[in-house]
Image: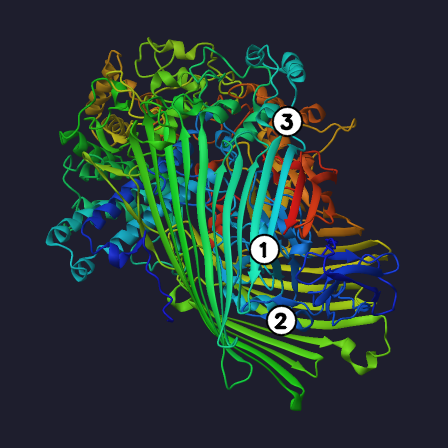
Amino acid sequence: CTDVGVEPESDASAERVFTDDSSYEAYLAKLYGGLNVTGQQGPDGNQDIGGIDEGFSQYMRMYWSLQQLSTDEAIIAWQDSGIELLNTHAWNEDNQFVRGMYDRIFFQVSHANEFLRQSTRSQLESRGNSQQVIEQMPQFRAEARFLRALSYWHGLDLFGNIPFVTQEFERGAEPPEQATREEVFNFVEQELLAITGEAGDTEEVLAPIGDAEYGRADRGAAYMLLAKLYQNAEVYVGENRSNDVADYTARIIDSGAYSLEEEYHNQFLADNEFSPEFIFAIPHDGQRTQHYGGTTFLGNASLGDQAGDFGFTGWYGLRTTSAVADRYDSNDERPVFPNTTGNQFIQEGRSKEVTDIPDFANGGGYIVPKYQNVTSQGEPGVNSEFSDVDYPMFRLADAYLMYAEAAVRGGGDMSRAVTLVNELQERAGLPGNLTSSDLTLDFILDERSRELLWEGHRRTDLIRFDEFTGSSLNWPWTQIEGFSSPDTRKLFPLPGSELRANPTLEQNPGYSGGE
Amino acid sequence: CLFLWVGTASAQDSQEITGTVTDASNGEPLPGANVTVVGEPIGTATNVDGEYALDVPSSAEMLRFSFIGYEAQEVPIEGRTTIDVALTSDASSLDEVVVIGYGTQEERDVTGAVESVRTEDFNQAPVVSPENLISGKVAGVQISSGDGSPGGGNLVRIRGENSFSAGNDPLYVIDGVPIDNGGNRAQRNPLNFLNPNDIASMTVLKDASATAIYGSRGANGVILIETKQAGEDEGRITYDGSVSTSVINDRVSMMGAEEYRNVVRNDGPSQAINQLGRTSTDWQDLVERQSFGQEHSVSFARGYEDSDFRLSLGYLDQEGTLQGSSTERISLSFNYNQQFLDDALSITANLRGSQTQDQFEPGGMVGNAASFNPTVPVRDFDSPYGGFFEWGESLAEKNPLAQLVLAENEGQARRSLGNVEAEYRIPFVEGLSARLNVGYDVQEGEQVFFAPTNLKEEADQGEDAGTVQRANFTRTNSLLDAYLTYDNEFEEIDSRFDITAGYSYQDFVSKFPEFTAFSLDNNIFGGSSTGPASESQTFVDVVPNRLISGFGRINYTFADRYLATFTVRRDGSSRFGPAEQWGTFPSAALGWRVNEEPFMDDVDFLSSLRLRLSWGITGNQEIGNFGFEPLYTPGDAQSQVQFGNSFITTLRPSAADEGLKWEEKTTYNAGINFGLFDERFSGSVEVYREDTDDLLRIIPVAAGANLRNRLLTNIGEVRNQGVETSLSLSIFRGGDFTWDANFNAAYNENEVLKVSNDDNFEGILTGGIAGATGNNVQILREGESLGTFFLYEQSYDENGDPIFTDPNDTEAYGELLNSRRPVGNASPDWVLGHTSQFAYQNFDASVSLRAHIGNDVYNNNASNFGHLGRLSDIVASNIHTSYNETGFTQPQYFSDIYLEDGSFLRLDNVSVGYTVRQIPGVNQLRVYGTASNLLTITGYDGPDPEVNGGIDNNLYPRSRSFTAGVNLQF
């Protein structure tokens, strides 16, 4: 006997796997799962990406950490290597959270590409897959392209010029080349136009707006992503695309597929799935989608010994700063601070100012139990360790505010903007009597913070309003007098590990290895 | 052999025989030599003048004369009444046969770096794991127990570490069957299935000339274990029994209750003051105990004209010095030899089986015992947590005794290993034999874990509280070796050839079905029922792999002085892709027996001198399976994805490097063996360099290029070079007293030559520590050795007190972090061993010492627990006494203040025995007492400087033990 070959048993090759029709949906599910779980075993085990604690490595946990901990909205008590440097704008190219986010983004891109390689019509035919699978594949492929576009958007937003690969690239070949932010921008734009059927070829398109199963992307999600891209086009490519923002957010608003949730807080509770306001959400389930990121992280980390009241166990980490606490009107029902009715007890003994970052219990800063693992009926989630709260990535209120901002910036209709903002105000228990003169850019930025607090938008917003760096915002949490962050902090560095693995890449200015 | 025994003379129909026993080399009388009647339990010893007198039954035919360090002689009586005998020294053991893998060789012909340790030289402590039998005995072989747990795993390193990720454990070959080193969760050390009493010898193959015959598995060295065979014994029953007790040496230096109270009252935040209790609890003391152990082993061996067999039964029960931990083993072994066809065909069967039962101390108990607030009580009768005191906060540390009492964690493993070997001397061709070896190794077992709903960490999970977990495993390994040997001498060309060529096929399958059930309604059924569970998780993994090989060896001797060995093995492994599946591993060695040269005839003091040179390539393939192919792995039921109202089980392909191949080690070795004064002093010196190339490492991949950000690939290079020396001395030999000693010393230098393709690569951080996640204190960097620490230099004020830098002060602390530099490393430069064996009349004694020099230890207990920040943690917890010196208010994990020299000298064993004479019906009775780990001399402040990997963190403490035992031969 000289046959050394042995067939794997608990794993299988692509050829074996894809003869089964259900494998395509299973792999597509993994592409969505890349935003959600961290490996093939929940809550941890058989990790998707390496070089980082699996709990840390959850997509939204890292995205949220980069988007929020670097701003006035959130600080964290922990001393896990590098996390405190997000609070203090002192991250460098070896920061594990920066690297982890980057790796997660390209995990998504690589697998979307692999899905596209494995699901071509000729592949399906040669494997003898059923007609049904062949027919549903174009939409599956459009969804893979949406998820790839989503991660590329995160990539260009956080990192600027990034490596660029599509399914045309051969797996395992030479390192990919770096594309400019503009090139990636154009690619994402073209992809989204294509899969919403706007670019002529209508073969691979998403389900019509509002038609997708919960948890999957339809054209509504793609419109929202396009609008996000256009909203920040000034930052990304130096163009004001407010008209396009207004156009695409209006399509969402006008579609009738979504409506505002009556009770603001219900969007962040254990039974928030199928919320009429959600355009694209990441469904969490305490039993079936276990991990230590997403709203499990957000809920647990934002609570200490009071966690049991909110269906969590408490990790003693996140608080907010006085800047946020002071931003709300005393009648505003959205925050969970002492200046509102209810929930006051949880701030007992806490100072509004952060006095000691590593000390959750006594170091000050209001806690923000926005994500609660309790249903709107007051029942706890199925599991106190893992959250049932779905993560609202895109929701209608954001589209309203994007429309309003576009109007202020010269796209869209101002009076409609006023109506939309007043709808949100009224839901927040405020009079809702704002007029167009109230809709200033400053108001929009603050209103976004009030409405979308801790939903992962703050860093991008601050950069768009040019308040992320310099000394224009007086960061109440840096504890360093005269703190002023250099403009180079608007981008995170390409990870040191990546520069070594792909020496053709150029580092962002201001970082080691960059200019 | 150390046993001096003299039987009784039963004088019936008998006559007296007298005589003198002398040393053949100088004619001096040998006092204390044994004289026995072959086949009868009758014997005596010579007196101071070497004279003896013995009543011998008239039926007796033969007398046997033996003495330590001399070759025994059997002399026919042939009616004489006076028999004088001159014994020849055999201290050199030059004519001993050593096992070399697919054969044996006379020790004097060996060209490679091979060292054998036999039963009589084994460590005598209560040894649970076979590796410990030769700890400190072989130069260049570091054997350190992983910790102090009963039957715990060992770190075994032959000539340092070669590999980043493919493992550094040697290959073990038991009676010709290479075994799988894989661990399992049901026992602490899978090698424990072997009863040390059944082992006849352990042979360490160090250089490539010796290991290349094991090809792709030889890179970390090979340990050949041969079990005892019956030989010519005529129905001997042997019983070995011992009882032992152990106490913990030292513990983590935490504050006592009073000291802690003072610190809290003076410097603590209000939280800590509020959490002060009224009691004084020494948690570490409460989780420890004086432990007891016993071991019994009975064997029966019998030889017949054409066959022989040995049967042995062993039982061992060893408690751990931490509450709740123990190991128990029942073992059975059977060896059988049968000759057929006028000895042309011989068949050997070895069969052994054992069952081990391990009780595991709860995870985290050591750390929690060190850390838990010393002022709170053990019990709190209002507590919902089984009546144990616990903090309300969910992330607070847990009461170590509650875990101990309430949770259950045990494993049971069964293993059987056997082989049948047939050797057939082919007629008509002199010296040609065919051999067939068929072997198997089957292991299976189960770990059972149960945590009741009222255990704090379970109770905190609300409805999910309560866990039952059962993790099973089955590993099977089947082997077929077929080979020819040709051994013949050709006087006309003054040459001798010993040729081996063969084929080997080995198949492995490992299966790991596991399930976890949780959310229990009640705790009534413990780990034995999932009835009360409303949730569960399951997991199955089945992993096959295969190795097919062809191998050959030529030993050539010219003029009885010039030796040459060539070996080659070609291995095919399922672990590599089609392009790299096969690898060839050659070696060559030359030897020169200088003392056989005519020009050495006049050099009288030199009794042997052999020079050796070798070169060879070996491999390492312990990398897991299918890294060359992107395989799809299904997700489990807890990592699904919600589509609409349904949950989808996902599929994910892995990253793959199609070109994955073997790690390759090239070894150069030069050695000298020498013997002086008739081998009274003998020894060896080895000099080696070992370069391991194509080292596998998981490295970052260019983003988007593969299916994962990290990929296992061949990238690194490591060099080990060093010197080893062994020396055996008969220091004193005369009167009733002998003193034999063995010294060994090994110096090894390890250097990482390459870790990346990037010249500017500064290395990767390794060596994770306890205290926040993702903090590393070691670095893998080119030019440094493996296990190099990476820390900043602690600065001190004018009083010599360390200066504290607040981690909140981003700039200053960041600067400090940037000043981290390589400093010290975890591996010893020198590993030294010494054994002395004494005999005086019927007494025998031995002492063994072991030392490591130049290893550094990072005291993670001190860095994690030794600061005031402990008091403002989620709950205030105990403080390491290093705080008294540092006064640190927050952790300073990366300060070199925590790095200490871990050099040590350890008195491993002291043993004293007495052999009782003249008990009717008993051939030999020896009683002995052994003290192990009696004394350690070190400058290290922590509990124990022997910390594998160099990071001292919540180690199961090692203990000092005392054993009393008896050896009986009927």
Disc 3 marks a residue whose amino acid type is Gly
Question: Which of the two residues, B901 or B595, is positioned nearer the viewer here?
Answer: B595
Task: Please state which of the two labelled residues, at mark 3 or mark 1, is closer to the viewer.
Answer: 1
Mark 1, secondary structure of its residue: strand
Q: Chain of mark 1?
A: B
Question: Which of the two residues, B157 or B198, is positioned nearer the viewer here?
Answer: B198
Is residue B6 placed above or below A331 in the rendered structure? below
Task: Please state which of the two labelled residues, at mark 1 or mark 2, is closer to the viewer.
Answer: 1
- At horizontal 32% and vertical 51% (from top left) the residue drawn is A10
Relative image position of residue B927 (x, y in whole percent): 70, 44
Q: Find residue B202 and report its image quarter.
A: bottom right
Q: Which residue is mark 3?
A: B866
Relative image position of residue B580 (x, y in whole percent): 43, 67
Contact between labelled residues 1 and 3, with CB atoms less than 8 Å apart: no
Mark 1 surroundings within 10 Å by alpha-carbon count, few (fewer than 14), some (14 through 19), many (20 or more): some
Residue placed furthest toward the bottom: B492
Between the C-alphas of marks 3 and 1, the distance is 46 Å
Q: Which residue is mark 1?
A: B199
Mark 1 and mark 2 lie on one chain; the one further toward the N terminus is 2
Q: Is residue A68 left or right of residue A232?
A: right
Relative image position of residue B292 (x, y in whole percent): 60, 34
Relative image position of residue B587 (x, y in whole percent): 58, 72
The quarter of the picture where the N terminus of chain B appears is bottom right
Q: Which residue is mark 2?
A: B105
Q: Chain of mark 2?
A: B
Disc 1 marks a residue whose amino acid type is Ile
Mark 2 surroundings within 10 Å by alpha-carbon count, few (fewer than 14), some (14 through 19), many (20 or more): some
Q: Chain of mark 3?
A: B
Q: Is residue B945 left or right of residue A258?
A: right
Between the C-alphas of marks 1 and 2, the distance is 19 Å
Work out whether disc 3 and disc 1 sit on a shared chain. Answer: yes
